[in-house]
Amino acid sequence: MCILLTVLATARPMRVPVQTATRLVFGEPSPAPARQHFVCGTKSALLCDATLAMLPLGLPAKRWTYLVNLAASEATVDGSKTTWMFKGSDGQPSTIVAAVLPETCSRHASPVRPHALTALLRGTKSADVLVVLEDTAHAGGAACAIARAFPTYTAKTRPSTQRETEETVAVGFATREGPLTEDYSNFAAAAEAVRRAARFVDLPPDVLGTNAFVNAALAAADRLTAKGFKVESSVLQGDAVREAGYGLLWAVGKAAEEPPALVILSHMPEAGSPPTETVCLVGKGIVYDTGGLSLKGKTGMPGMKSDCGGAAALLGAFEAAVEIGLEGKALHLVLCLAENAIGPRALRNDDVVTGLSGLSCEINNSDAEGRLVLADGVALATAVPPRLPGLQGQPDLIIDMATLTGAQMVATGKRHAGIVANSDEVEAAAVAAGKISGDTCHPLPFVPEYYTTEFASKVADMKNSVKDRNNAQSSCAATFIYNHIEPSFDGGWLHVDLAGPSFIDDRGTGYGVGLALALLQVDGFKSST
C-alpha cells in the first residue's frame, strides 16, 4: 500500500466570476405562490388528474390544457414550451411555463428524456419547477439532467452596477399518482456532483492544473469527513509517481510545469463489517492535451481542457455515492492526473516506457496518452498483493471512465458513451444504468484476441497506438487498458469512453456521474422493476 503524501505546490488562484451561480434546491412540491412556475413532463403526464391538482391556484384548467396542447404541437426532439401570465393566489402576477417532453422514447434512449429536460430548463431564472415523471425511479436521472442546465463556471465580466443577484430554482417531483415524497437529499447530492464535474471540464487550463485538481479531490474528502463519513486519502505527485512504478503516468505528464499526480480516495464500511462488494473507479484526468510531440493542430487542440472529463465525473460520483450511502460496499477512487504538454522533457515517439503492470510500451503516438495513464490506474486497482487501502484481494468491479477517442463519437455519437465490458452481465448492467440515470451508453466489441495485435512492437511488449486506424479504434484503445489489468483478475471490468457526451456545445455536461451512481445502485438511481 502506498501511504504517500508529497507537498503540493500552491495552485494558481481561481478567477472569481462576477455572476452568481443559480442555486438549486430540491424538495417536495410546494403549493405556495411563486412568481414563476415551471411544470415539465410528457403531454399525457401534464394533463393527468394528479398534475391538475398541483397547478398553482388562480390558473384556469382550460387555459393549462390549451398551453400544454400548444406546446405539444410544436415539440421537437428537445421538447417545447409555452408561457402564460396569470394572477396568483396572493393577488400578484405570476408566470407559468408548460414544458412538454417528447412522447417518443426509442429502446436505446432513456425514458428520463434527459436532453429535452436540460434543453427546456436552460436559461430559467428563479422559479418553482415541478417535473412529472413517468416513474419514481427516474427522479435521480432527472435531477442530473436539471443540474446540467445550470453550469457554475463563467469568466464573463460585467460592470459592478449590473451584478446579478443569486437566482434560486426550487425543484420538486411528482408522478401520475401525486407528489414524490422520497428523500430529496439524494437528488440534491447527485445534482451537485454533476455541476461540480461539469465545472472541472469548463475550467480553463490556466486555472485547473494538476495541483488544483489534487486539491479539489482532497477538498471532497474533507467535505465528506466533516459530514461524518470515513474517507482515506493519499497522493503521489512528481518524482514520487515515477519512484512508485507508475511509469506510464509519469511519462505523459513529466514535461508539464505542474507534475503528474495519482490520487486515491477510499471509503470502507464500518469497522467489523466486511464489504458486500468492492468497486474501484479509475478516472483519466488529463487537464490539458496538446497531443504532446504528436502535436494537435489549431482546430484539434481547442477544447482539450475537456480531457479530464472521466476523472471529473468519477470524483463527483464518489462524493455523491458516499454521501447518499453505499449499503455496505467499499469504494475506491483512483485519479490519474497529468498535463500532456510539450517541452524538452516531453515524451517522444520511439521512447520505451514501462508501467506498473511491468509491461513495456513503445510510444508511436504521444497523443494516445489517455490509455497510458489509465493503464497504470487499472494495474494499481488489480495489483497483487493489493495496493489499495483495506483491500483483501482484488475488487469485484472496476469502472474506468475517459474522454479517450474521437472514434467514440463516430461509433455511438454525442449522447451515448461507448462502453467495453469483459462480461455480458457488466455490459447489461451498464446499459440499464444508462437508461435509468439518463447517461445513456452503447456496447462496443470486446475481443482482445482481435485487437491486441494492432499494438504489436518489435522492441517492446506493445505500442500505444494502433497499426490500422480503421479497425475499431475505440475497442482497440479499451483493449490496451485491459491488457494492463493483472492477469489473475477475475472480476468485472467496464470501460466508459465518454468523449462525446461529456462536452457538448463547448460546455461540460457532468456526464458519467449519474451512470456511476446507477451502477453503484445508490438510492434514487435504482430501477423500480
Image (spheres, helix red, strand yellow):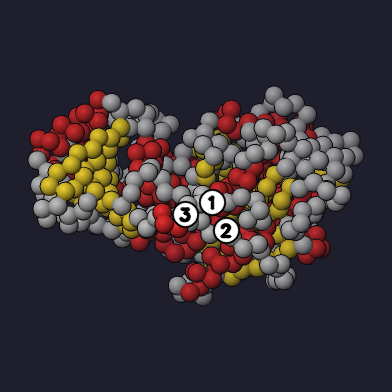
Using residue 68 as the reference point, say whether residue 407 is left or right of it.
right
Disc 1 element: loop
- Neighbours of disc 1 within 10 Å: few (<14), some (14-19), many (20+): few
Of labels 2 and 1, earlier in sequence is 2
Where's residue 381, x and y in %?
66, 56
Label 2 and label 1: CA atoms lie apart by 7 Å
Identity, as a three-letter code, of the amino acid under mark 2 = Arg
**Quadrant, the N terminus:** bottom right
Label 3 and label 1: CA atoms lie apart by 13 Å
Q: Which residue is mark 2?
A: 15
Disc 2 element: loop
- The answer to whether the residues at label 2 and label 1 have Cβ atoms under 8 Å apart is yes
- Residue at 46% x, 49% y is 151
Q: Which residue is mark 1?
A: 155
- Neighbours of disc 3 within 10 Å: few (<14), some (14-19), many (20+): few
Q: Which residue is mark 3?
A: 159
- Residue at 51% x, 73% y is 225
Identity, as a three-letter code, of the amino acid under mark 3 = Pro
Where's residue 118, x and y in %?
39, 41
